[in-house]
Amino acid sequence: METARCRAVLAAAETGSFSRAAEVLRYTPSGVNQLVTAFENELGFSVFRRSTKGVSLTENGQLLLPTVREFLRQEDRLFELATEINGLLIGSVTIAAYSSIATHWLPAVIRVFQQDYPHVSIRLMEGIWQEVSGWLDDRTADIGFFSYQEGMPYEWIPLAEDPMLALLPQGHPLADASAYPLKDCEKDDFIMPALGCDDDVEALFRHYGIVPKIRFTTMENFSAMSMVEQGLGISIMNQLITEGHICNVVKLPLAPPAQITMGAALHSRVDASPAVKMFLKYAVRMLTQTETT
């Protein structure tokens, strides 16, 4: 199986187009088409459905994609190990992270890491818990930076405890209180981020047996903060999310107090590439000694 064919298949699957895949790989569209066709001929079945709008994976293609991605990952690791033996660290690191972590923590780590290892490319992807976990599961991402949840099938490195806060509009009756009673989420209009799928907030409610009065859902946390500012309800977020956002809202600790554990996750440090291992080393050192103090 030729590597070039596998890379063409992966690029086309990720971009949905031979033309865009060609831009990523610096080939011509016809070159990508030829590589994909040769790949399909070698296997004896079609991997893509072709249309005027682009390409999409067939069912067989969807079954193959994780194996293709892993094949290329192992080949990259082989070359990275060889260059490490020769004294030069190269390769790539794909990071999946909460937007708050990507904004407040990772840029400093990437800057220092790149100063020491300029030949390692960094790809940063941002998403909610389910997206970060999904990118780890299908190995699109090498490392995930997000919050801990029970039963995660990853190697976990805790970095910091981040308190959960209640966000209230200025005119709320408890705006001057020392803490917000979590049980009041059952009577106050609640604004749920992540389209109602915020695992950190849902886990908190499940733990205390609370059924919130969800009035609105949003995709972005900043949208939820703006809605709180306009008096549309209250919300709950971890403190890191709220940093750097200028909204005229009241931030209160919860009663009882709650926090989430932020950290890094990967499938295995033993099997990780040299570049991934080194980036993780930098992240753990910087985030546990500086960002989280």
Image: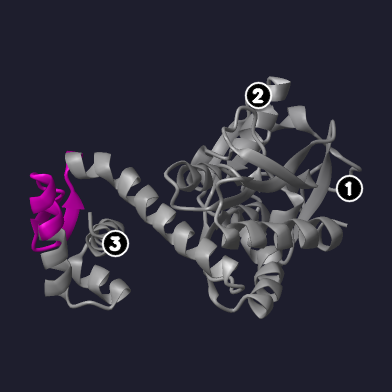
Q: What element carries label 3?
A: helix
Magenta span includes 48: yes
* Residue 6 % position (x, y): 26, 57
Mark 1 or mark 3: which comes first in sequence? 3
- Label 2 with label 1: CB-CB less than 8 Å: no
* Residue 220 % position (x, y): 54, 54
Mark 2 or mark 1: which comes first in sequence? 1
Look at the picture and state if 196 lies above or below 30.
above
Does residue 131 appear to the left or right of 99 in the view shown? Answer: left
Q: Please identify, in this view, whether the residue under mark 1 or under mark 3 is nearer the observer.
A: 3
* Of 287 and 2, the residue lying toward us: 2
Query: Could you tell me if residue 123 is visible in this image?
Result: no
* Of 164 and 153, the residue lying toward us: 153
Q: Name the residue under label 1.
A: 176
**Residue 206 numbered mark, or none:** 2
Q: Name the residue under label 3.
A: 7
**Residue 196 numbered mark, or none:** none
Amino acid under disc 1: Asp
Indicate the colouring scheme: one colour
* Of 222 and 233, the residue lying toward us: 222
Q: Residues within 10 Å of mark 1 (few under 14, many from 20)?
A: few
Magenta extent = 38-59
Q: Residue at x 48, y 58 (%)?
A: 77
Amino acid under disc 3: Arg
Amino acid under disc 2: Arg
Q: How far apart are marks 1 and 3 (CA)?
A: 58 Å
Query: Could you tell me if residue 106 is visible in this image?
Result: yes
Q: Please identify, in this view, whether the residue under mark 2 or under mark 3 is nearer the observer.
A: 3
